[in-house]
Image: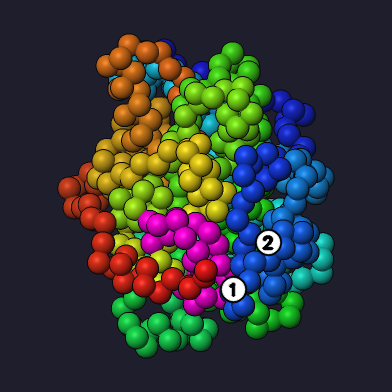
């Protein structure tokens, strides 16, 4: 049986983002100022002003729905609504009674979910008169998406790309440059933060925490520049909820409701964008048995191994202090190919929901995730990025559990993007050269010793 697609008419594309903050059973701990360490009121922009005013307001908004500007909607329509598929071939290969659906964000021009927030952030910066953006990127999905968004609104962009991914994934750099952005490996000689780290360790492979520090320093150094971020913060998760809002309509078309929702997490924006519009049903009591499973790498397992505490969002302590599960802001994770999952912390909203027991988390090894990705490619035809391979591994495990129990559960996969620029990683796997990285416990202990002291 061929896979079934549930197409949504472009006229039915959601026109508002869903904000979960008003529906949380307990309020989110407030962000803290990186210097004073004092809580920032939820109704005020966080100093220093990293983002445009409209973004600051969205970060703390109590509105349940926030209208998507027409200028943003018009660009969204280049690829949205994205398809929902029923994975009949995968189900057959696994001999499972489970029904497997996946919402596929790889059809965007950048190949991932990232443009959903990139276009919005570029729009607000342009509307408020800024000329330039500075950002970081791990695997390059965010950097390429923001390069596209900046191009649409005539903005300059400088991207600090984690060095290991800069070397592993040159084609994403080429995407950024084709769309007009400047991309440099991080740590770089272009900032004080980068120069300090290169002096301490000239062979540093970099981390998202370091790259974030460089981008923030860059933004502070230019009056015409704002910082832009691709994950973690409330407003980014907000923009991604168009994915889940669309998916709810498509699942209605399929006459189905998920028992289990699975996605990968690095900073958390992709998966949160899918599950937040669903988890409100669990919070309200309408669907108390809904399971939400977050998949992360064993080499950087913030939810499953990190403490829930206050930590900086970046290596240099320039970003806000957040309450999150963290491995320490100075932690440099092993160079796994899932570059988008190598952040030291996690989105505060996801951490809050995990602390409340509303979502689950699992950590997966690199080899097992590529095995799952190959299975998905050889059944559904889609070559997935290393990041969603983690979620595919969990989906397969859950489908096989249904086979054991005989339960015909409905499983929904949040599929964040294709792996066309990650074929070197697949080559390593298929040739037997790919290896697993163990959880670097000693390095994490060292990094956790640098947590900010907050009472």
Q: Split into 4 quadrants, where in the image is the N terminus?
A: top left
Look at the picture and state if 160 lies above or below 414.
below
Residue at x 75% of width, y 48% of height? 62
Of residue 158 and residue 121, the one placed in the foreground of this image is: 121
The structure residue drawn at horizontal position 34% and vertical position 18%, both measured from the top left corner, is: 402
Q: Which residues are magenta?
A: 306-327
Name of the residue lying farthest toward the front: 455
Disc 1 packing (10 Å; few <14; some 14–19; many ≥20): some
Rendered residue at 32%/82% (across/down): 201
Q: Residue at x 81, y 47 (%)?
A: 69
Q: Is residue 258 visible?
A: yes
Q: Which mark is residue 121?
A: none
| Nearer to me, 284 or 190 | 284
User: Is residue 325 found inside the magenta-colored segment of the image?
Assistant: yes
Question: Residue 34: where, in percent of width, then height?
Answer: 58, 74
Q: Is residue 385 left or right of residue 78?
A: left
Front position in the image: 6 or 58: 58
Foreground tag (1 vs 2): 1
Quarter holding residue 127: bottom right
Query: Is 347 within the magenta?
Result: no
Percent position (x, y) of residue 263?
46, 39
Q: Earlier in the sequence, mark 1 or mark 2?
A: 1
Say the numbered circle drawn on residue 37. Answer: 1
Q: Nearer the viewer, residue 92 or 21?
A: 21
Q: CA distance from mark 1 to mark 2?
A: 33 Å
Quick check: 357 above or below 168?
A: above
Expressed as whole percent of the image width and height from the top left, the position of residue 376 reads: 36, 31
Q: How many neighbours does mark 2 have within 10 angstroms: few (below 14), some (14-19), or many (20 or more)?
A: many
How are the colours assigned in the image? rainbow
Task: Tell me which corner region of the image, top left, top right, bottom left or bottom right, holds residue 139.
Answer: bottom left
Residue that mark 2 sits on: 150
Q: Secondary structure at mark 1?
A: loop
């Amino acid at each position: 049986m061929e896979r079934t697609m549930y197409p949504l008419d472009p006229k039915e594309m959601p026109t508002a983002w869903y904000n979960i903050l008003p529906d949380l059973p307990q309020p989110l701990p407030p962000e803290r100022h990186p210097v004073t360490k004092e809580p920032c009121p939820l109704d005020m922009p966080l100093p220093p002003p990293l983002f445009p005013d409209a973004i600051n307001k969205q970060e703390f908004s109590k509105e349940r729905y926030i209208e998507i500007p027409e200028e943003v909607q018009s660009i969204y329509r280049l690829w949205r609504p994205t398809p929902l598929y029923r994975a009949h071939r995968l189900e057959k290969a696994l001999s499972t009674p489970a029904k497997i659906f996946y919402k596929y964000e790889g059809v965007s021009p950048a190949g991932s979910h990232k443009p959903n927030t990139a276009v919005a952030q570029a729009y607000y910066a342009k509307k408020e008169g800024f000329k330039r953006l500075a950002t970081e990127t791990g695997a390059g999905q965010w950097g390429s998406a923001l390069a596209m968004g900046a191009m649409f609104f005539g903005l300059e962009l400088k991207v600090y790309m984690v060095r290991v991914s800069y070397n592993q994934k040159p084609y994403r750099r080429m995407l950024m440059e084709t769309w007009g952005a400047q991309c440099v490996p991080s740590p770089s000689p272009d900032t004080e933060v980068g120069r300090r780290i290169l002096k301490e360790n000239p062979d540093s492979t970099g981390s998202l925490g370091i790259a974030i520090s460089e981008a923030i320093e860059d933004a502070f150094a230019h009056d015409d520049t704002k910082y832009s971020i691709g994950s973690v913060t409330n407003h980014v998760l907000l923009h991604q909820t168009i994915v889940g809002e669309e998916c709810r309509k498509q699942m209605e078309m399929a006459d189905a409701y998920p028992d289990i929702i699975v996605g990968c997490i690095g900073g958390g924006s992709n998966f949160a964008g899918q599950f937040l519009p669903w988890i409100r049903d669990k919070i309200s009591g309408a669907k108390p048995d809904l399971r939400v499973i977050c998949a992360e790498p064993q080499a950087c397992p913030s939810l499953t191994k990190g403490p829930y505490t206050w930590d900086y969002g970046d290596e240099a302590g320039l970003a806000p202090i957040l309450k999150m599960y963290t491995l320490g802001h100075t932690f440099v994770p092993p160079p796994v190919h899932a570059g988008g999952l190598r952040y030291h912390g996690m989105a505060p909203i996801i951490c809050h929901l995990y602390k409340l027991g509303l979502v689950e988390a699992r950590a997966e090894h690199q080899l097992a995730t590529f095995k799952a990705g190959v299975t998905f490619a050889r059944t559904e035809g889609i070559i997935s990025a290393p990041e969603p391979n983690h979620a595919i591994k969990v989906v397969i495990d859950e489908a096989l559990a249904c086979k054991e129990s005989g339960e015909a559960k409905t499983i929904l996969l949040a599929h964040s993007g294709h792996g066309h620029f990650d074929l070197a990683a697949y080559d390593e796997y298929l040739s037997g050269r790919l290896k697993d990285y163990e959880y670097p416990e000693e390095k994490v202990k060292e990094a956790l010793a640098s947590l900010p002291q907050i009472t």
